[in-house]
Amino acid sequence: MRPARTPPPIDAAALNDAALAYLARYAATEAGLRRVLQRRVDRWTSGQSDPEATAPALEAARQAIDGVVANLVRLGALSDVGFAETRARSLTRAGRSRRAVQAALVAKGVAPDLARDATGDNAGAELAAALVLARKRRLGPWRAAEPEDMRAARQRELGVLARAGFDRDTAERALDTEREEADRRIHALRAGQAPPDPSEAEDM
C-alpha cells in the first residue's frame, strides 16, 4: 500500500502562483483574493497528518497572504478601482440600478466610497439601465398590449422598478419613454457612450 501523498509546502511563492492563476481566470478585489488564498491555506491544512508539526508553516502562510496581495496591487495586477469600474459598467448595462450596483460591489469587497465613485451620478445612465430592465420585463414601451386597468398596471410596473432600486422619478421616466427613444438610450449605454441627461433632453 502506497503511503499517503504529503501535500507540498505552502509558502509565499506557492500563494503567489495560486493568486496569479486565479487572476488569469477571474477578476477579483483585494478582499476576494484574500479569501481565495485563505481557502487554499485551509485546504493545505486539512491534508496534514500532524497539525502540531505544521503549525509554524501554517502561521507563516497566513501571514504571507497580505504580502502577496499587496505585491500584486503594487504591480498593477490587482486593483479594486479597476474591478469596481469594470463591474459597475457591466451591471449597469445589464439593467441594474445604481443602488443595486453599489450593493453588489460592496458584497465583493469593494469599499463603499469606491463603489459610489464607480457608479457615479449619471442620470442618463440610470435611466438607460431602468429601460434595460423594462425591456426584459416587458414594461412601459415594451408592453405586449394596453392593459384594461392602466392605473393598476402602471403601479405594478413602478413597483418592479422600485424593487430593483430605481427611484420614483427614474421609474416614471422609463415607463413614459417612447419606444424609439428607449432603444436609442439602451444602444448608447451598451456602446459605452454616455446617454444624455433626461432633463436636458426634455429642454431641447
Image (tube, rainbow, N blue to C red):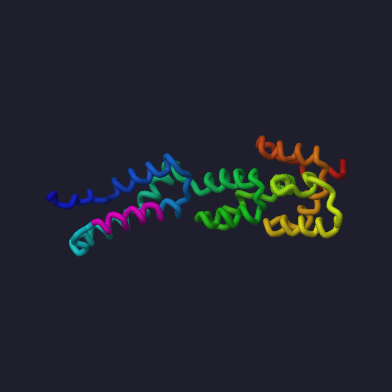
The residue that appears at 41% across and 55% down in the rendered structure is 35
Judging depth in this view, the residue of 141 and 44 nearest the camera is 141
In the rendered image, residue 140, in percent from the top left (x then y), is placed at: 79, 48
In the rendered image, residue 17, in percent from the top left (x then y), is placed at: 33, 43
**Residue range (magenta):** 35-47
Q: Residue furthest bottom?
A: 52
Prevalent SS, magenta region = helix
Q: Is residue 72 magenta-colored?
A: no
Residue 46 belongs to magenta span: yes
| Number of disc labels | 0
Q: Nearer the viewer, residue 17 or 118?
A: 17
Image quadrant where residue 112 sits:
bottom right
Query: Residue at left 79%, top 45%?
Result: 144
143 sits to left or right of 26: right
Looking at the picture, how far across and down is residue 59, in whole percent?
A: 27, 60
Residue drawn where x is 42% and y is 41% of the image: 75
Q: Nearer the viewer, residue 158 or 15?
A: 158
